[in-house]
């Protein structure tokens, strides 16, 4: 994104910063989905800082708004690791599950997936197709059947076969908010009857801007989200959204999707991300 490069280059060259420069920086920060409050804080800090200190001061401020929780994926080790993937429809949730399949398979983990988005036949077909391609068993149920039942069947199979990773793909029908959250809670309860939940990963589309923050808050209020998968971070996204979500929710971004293939999943590097914002 290099949001501050023009400002820094002017200062390094000894040029004065005009009012129009500050206005342009403010516009760029807001356009990047950093958010109005954080943008105002950064502009105020930059105006007060000495020219030789401004870069380190801005970097420190940005860093202070990052989530402090661990970005590591929690892997149980002695038992199956259970991961529930949540998010609204259209964010790339099912594709993110496929990427997680490949990510763990590439690390030589045995993986089983439950297709618990039973209200979308396309989601069931999609995850089964991915499973066949990647070589991961997918547990399915009846179309429009009970999602928790599919999740329960999945965790039972995962434990009986000594699988290392169990992933649940869930529905994301936000127009029935209370019903969706009750459904997710039920899925969690039935899985926990067999084995603990290690991660609840929320998939957020980076291109949705402030709406992504609203989704993060909504799910965080209703289910114990442990981390975020930020999709569509392939150059078209407004990069400030990762920082904005962490600043407003405290939930760490753990993974980013940078393309459509199953291999396009990366661990989120917070330091590299911040350097990309200011470089």
Image: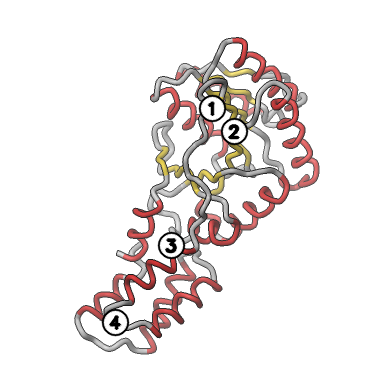
The picture places residue 66, in percent across and down from the top left corner, at 48, 58
Where the N terminus falls, by quadrant?
bottom left
Q: Residue at x 43, y 31 (%)?
A: 262
User: Residue 18 falls in which quadrant of the image?
Assistant: bottom left
Judge from the rendering whether residue 150 lies leftward or rightward of residue 62; answer left or right.
right
Along the polypeptide, which appears first: circle 2 or circle 4?
A: 4
Give the distance between the C-alpha atoms of the residues marked 2 and 4, in whole angstroms: 46 Å
For label 2, the crowd category at 10 Å Cα-Cα, with few meaning under 14, some 14 to 19 and many 20 or more, is some
Q: Residue at x 43, y 49 (%)?
A: 233
Q: Is residue 235 above or below residue 137?
A: below
Say which element carries label 3.
helix
Say which element carries label 1.
loop
Give the distance between the C-alpha atoms of the residues marked 1 and 2, in whole angstroms: 7 Å
Q: Is residue 57 above or below residue 212?
A: below
Give the distance between the C-alpha atoms of the residues marked 1 and 3, in whole angstroms: 29 Å
Q: Nearer the viewer, residue 186 or 197?
A: 197
Q: Residue furthest front?
A: 78
Q: Residue at x 59, y 43 (%)?
A: 226
Mark 3 highlights which residue?
Answer: 63
Along the polypeptide, which appears first: circle 1 or circle 3?
A: 3
Where the C terminus falls, by quadrant?
bottom left
Give the distance between the C-alpha atoms of the residues marked 4 and 3, in whole angstroms: 19 Å
Q: Nearer the viewer, residue 139 or 245?
A: 245
Mark 2 highlights which residue?
Answer: 198
Along the polypeptide, which appears first: circle 4 or circle 3?
A: 4
Q: Are marks 2 and 3 in contact (CB under 8 Å)?
A: no
The picture places residue 151, in percent across and down from the top left corner, at 68, 24
Which color mode does the image show? secondary structure
Number of numbered markers: 4
Mark 4 highlights which residue?
Answer: 51
User: Which label was assigned to residue 76?
Assistant: 1
Q: Nearer the viewer, residue 103 or 138?
A: 103
């Amino acid at each position: 994104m290099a949001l501050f490069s023009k400002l820094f280059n002017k200062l390094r060259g000894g040029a004065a910063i005009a009012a129009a420069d500050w206005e342009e920086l403010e516009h760029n920060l807001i356009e990047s989905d950093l958010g109005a409050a954080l943008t105002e804080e950064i502009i105020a800090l930059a105006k007060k800082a000495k020219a030789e200190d401004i870069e380190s001061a801005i970097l420190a401020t940005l860093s202070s708004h990052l989530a402090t929780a661990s970005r590591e994926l929690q892997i149980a080790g002695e038992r199956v690791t259970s991961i529930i993937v949540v998010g609204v429809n259209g964010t790339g949730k099912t594709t993110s599950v496929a990427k997680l399949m490949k990510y763990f398979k590439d690390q030589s983990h045995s993986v089983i997936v439950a297709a618990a988005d039973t209200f979308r036949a396309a989601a069931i077909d999609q995850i089964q197709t991915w499973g066949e391609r990647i070589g991961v068993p997918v547990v399915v149920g009846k179309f429009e059947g009970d999602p928790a039942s599919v999740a329960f069947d999945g965790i039972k199979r995962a434990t009986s076969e000594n699988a290392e990773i169990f992933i649940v793909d869930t529905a994301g029908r936000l127009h029935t908010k209370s019903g969706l959250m009750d459904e997710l809670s039920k899925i969690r309860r039935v899985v926990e009857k067999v084995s603990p939940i290690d991660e609840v990963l929320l998939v957020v589309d980076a291109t949705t801007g402030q709406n992504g923050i609203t989704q993060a808050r909504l799910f965080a209020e209703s289910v114990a989200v442990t981390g975020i998968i930020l999709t569509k971070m392939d150059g078209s996204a407004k990069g400030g959204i990762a920082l904005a979500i962490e600043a407003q929710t405290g939930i760490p971004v753990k993974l980013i999707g940078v393309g459509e293939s199953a291999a396009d999943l990366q661990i989120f590097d917070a330091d590299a991300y911040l350097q990309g914002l200011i470089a």
